[in-house]
Image: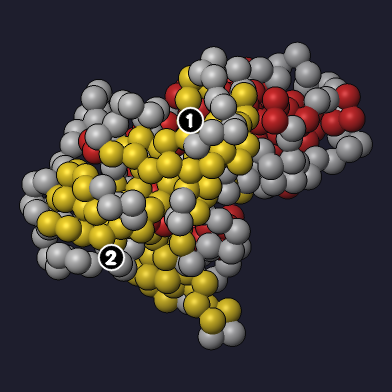
Amino acid sequence: MSTVTLNNVCKNYAGIPVSKNIDLEIDNGEFVVFVGPSGCGKSTLLRMIAGLEEISSGDLYIGDVRVNDKPPSERSVGMVFQSYALYPHLSVAENMAFGLKLAKTDRAEIDRRIENAARILQLDKLLERKPKDLSGGQRQRVAIGRTMVREPQVLLFDEPLSNLDAGLRVQMRIEIASLHKRLRSTMIYVTHDQVEAMTLADKIVVLDGGHIAQVGAPLELYHYPGNRFVAGFIGSPQMNFIEVELHRPSAQLTEIRLPNGQLLSIPVDSTGIDAGASVTLGIRPEHCLPAGQAEASIEGAVRVAERLGDQTLVYLELDGIGPATLRLEGDVPVDDSAPQALGLDPNRCHLFREDGRACPRLYREPGFTG
C-alpha cells in the first residue's frame, strides 16, 4: 500500500517552528499537491516525507510502516527535483540506469525498467541522446524516468516545472497529469503556482505559515474556501475583499451593509456574530456583474483595462475602499473615463469573520458535487 500518513508532524530549526502539527492522510494512488506562498513550509514537508529532513516530532507512515528513522533509500519513495541534475556525458538510457547500477540491479531487469519507463514517457526514441541534445521538457521527462525506474511506492515532485518557460510548463502539466492516469501511483507535488495545483491535483493541501490552512478537491477550495487566506490564494485574479457591516445575522440569509450604505442579503450562515460587527465580503472577479445587473454595486474609477481576447480584466479603485478587479467578456467596451460599477451577485458572495474563518455558504454551485 502506498498511502502516506502524517500524525502531528512538526519541524523546528533551532527552536523555530517551520512545520506545525501537520495531520494529513494521502490515499493510495492519489495525486496531492502542496501549495502556498514562499516560506510556508511546503518543500520542508516534502523533504521530511522523502527522508531528507529529520522530523522533530510526530509520526510519518508510508503504508503501514513508521519511517521516521528510516533513510531515504528504505522508504520506497522517489523524488524529482527542480533541477534536472542529469549527467551531461551519459546518454538518456545511462542516466536512467545510473541509480540501478549503483544498487547492483541485474542487467536484464535494468533494461526492462528503462524500456517500460521510456515507453510511458515517450522517450523510447531518445535513449541514445545526450542531455545537450534534448529540449527542456525532454530533460524533465528523463529526470522523471530516472526516478520511475526505481519503482518507488510514492513519487515526490519538488517544483519540477519552475525552470521551464510558460509554454513548456503547460505541456509538462499535461504530461504529468497523463502519467498519473497511466501509473495510478501515489504522487505528492510541491508548487507555489495555484494554477498547477488546480489543474493537477486530486486533493490540494494549502499551507500557510507552516500549518495546513485547508485540504480539499480543487473546486471545493475554489467555491467553498474555509478562510480568507485560502480564498485569496486560490483563484486568479484573486478574490476581491470589501470590509462591510453585519446588519442582520441569520442562519439562512445574512444581511450586510456595504460601505456606500446599500443593503445586500446573501445566503450564508452568520450565526454567532453580533449585529453591527465588522466582517469581510468576498467575491471573485469572474462572479461580479456589470452595472444594471446586480441587486447592489459599488462604483470605482478604472485604473487599467487589460484586453486578453477571451476576457477583459478591469482594475478598479473603489470609492473609499481600495483596489478591486472585474472580469468581463473579451469584447465588452470599457470607458476608462467614467466610473465603473462592481456588481455583487448575492449567490456568489462569501463572508469572513474577523478572525478570517469563512461563514458557511448555503448556495450550491451548479454542477459542483463536492
- Residue 265: x %, y % from top left: 17, 44
Residue placed most toward the observer, 1 or 183: 183
Asked if one can make out residue 16 in the rendered structure from this viewpoint, the answer is yes
Give how far apart the Cα atoms at labels 2 and 1 are: 27 Å
Would you name the residue on which mark 2 appears? 278
Q: Which mark is residue 327?
A: 1
Q: Which mark is residue 26?
A: none
In the image, residue 55 sits, relative to residue 213, either above or below, namely below
Helix, strand or loop status at disc 1: strand
Q: Quadrant of the N terminus?
A: top left
Q: Viewed as shown, does residue 140 lie left or right of 51? A: right
Coloring basis for residues: secondary structure
Residue placed most toward the observer, 274 or 222: 274
How packed mark 2 is, by other alpha carbons closer than 10 Å (few <14, some 14-19, many 20 or more), is: some
How packed mark 1 is, by other alpha carbons closer than 10 Å (few <14, some 14-19, many 20 or more), is: many
Residue placed most toward the observer, 111 or 241: 241
Going by the numbered disc 1, the residue's amino acid type is: Arg
- Residue 346: x %, y % from top left: 24, 38
Q: Which residue appears at 74% of the width and 32% of the height?
A: 165
Q: Viewed as shown, does residue 109 lie left or right of 330? A: right
In the image, residue 267 sits, relative to residue 227, either above or below, namely above
